[in-house]
Amino acid sequence: MPPSPEPDEFALIARYFAPLARSSPGSLGLLDDAALLETEPGQALVLAADMAVEGVHFTESDPPELIGRKVLRYNLSDLAAMGAAPIAYLLTLAKPEQRSSEWVGAIAAGLADDQDAFGISLIGGDTSASPGPAMLSITVIGSVRSGEALQRSGARPGDVVFVSGTIGDGTLGLKSTKGDLDGLATGDRDYLEDRYRLPQPRLALGRALIGLATAAVDVSDGLVADLAHICQASGVGAVIEAPAVPLSPPAKAAISEGRIALSALLTGGDDYELLFCVPQDRLEAAERLEEAGGVAVTQIGRIAEGTDVEVLGEDGKPMAIESKGYRHF
């Protein structure tokens, strides 16, 4: 019996993506060229977009059900960094001929899981054939009260710098998926690869930072690089105390075993934790963030005069940092 023909563009949308849009009236069933979103007075929309390209952000062997989830999650992390709550998202997909409809279906199934977890739904997008690599792009839409969005530009000298969760797991997880961390204990390998493939957007923490943090960013390009983004936007400098940066047990083991240098974890990306600044007179409130945000937060440094980010080692002297973080180009 000859194989069944692959569904065309509209059948693919109807089969896999229309079900993701059923809970949002603004999607119009994915039957129109745009979506409709009605917002309340006093609310501001927050929009962010990211893409994933095969061979750059994921590989041919990556589980497809995780690819869409990761792209959605690092978009949600952008919302978290602004204190916004998710509303909906749009998706574009470029599918090479060698990728089957079942591959698309697995991406949709993964997205369905995360829609339930994060209270968000698909409202539109586009699909296309591709002669080159597969590509998936998501634009996420969130909402925050007018005038309350967290930004990068409010840090002032004397502010204390905090970070959520642990740093460096994304870098180590990527190395592990590439086979560059031989000898890891199975539990450590699974933990690190899960942190890389399925980051946790800190949405509750982002909302808890409204009215408390003077500036915030998510750690996507690397701790040092992303703090530099705050410094550039705010016209300040910063000091990181490397021994204070929180590390997971697998990350500490990787350093002690000589598998990776601490500086590489401070400049690697894909952690998607929140990095934020708090004035001295709000530190007592910051100590209660773990309960409100559902994740530990740690003081790692301070905002200072100047324009650069300085990293101090165990001896209190500046560490040599060759590359501050990830760049696409």
Image (cartoon, rainbow, N blue to C red):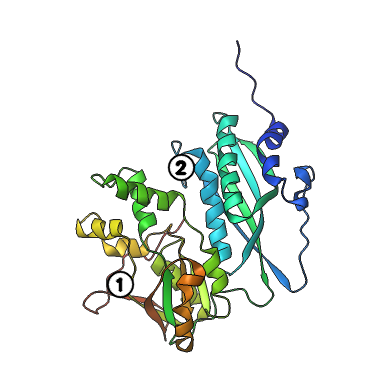
Residues at marks 1 and 2, CA–CA distance in whole angstroms: 32 Å
Q: Nearer the viewer, residue 245 or 235?
A: 245
Q: Amino acid at mark 1?
A: Ala
* Tag 1 residue: 242
Whether residue 14 appears in this view of the structure is yes
Disc 1 crowd, CA 10 A, few/some/many (<14, 14-19, 20+): many
Image point (45%, 66%), residue name: 295
Q: Are marks 1 and 2 in contact (CB under 8 Å)?
A: no
In the picture, the disc for residue 26 is none
Q: Which of the 4 image quadrants contains residue 15? A: top right
User: Where is residue 139 shown, x and y percent of the image?
Assistant: 63, 54
Image point (23%, 75%), residue name: 314
- The kind of secondary structure element at disc 1 is helix
Task: Single out the residue that lies furthest toward the bottom.
Answer: 281
Image point (50%, 44%), residue name: 66
Whether residue 131 appears in this view of the structure is no
User: Where is residue 65 shown, x and y percent of the image?
Assistant: 52, 40
First in residue order: circle 1 vs circle 2: 2
Q: Amino acid at mark 2?
A: Gly
Note whether 323 is above or below 237 in the view shown.
above
- Judged left or right of residue 245, residue 216 is right
- Judged left or right of residue 125, residue 218 is left
Image point (29%, 56%), residue name: 250
User: Where is residue 52 shown, x and y percent of the image?
Assistant: 53, 48
In the picture, the disc for residue 55 is 2
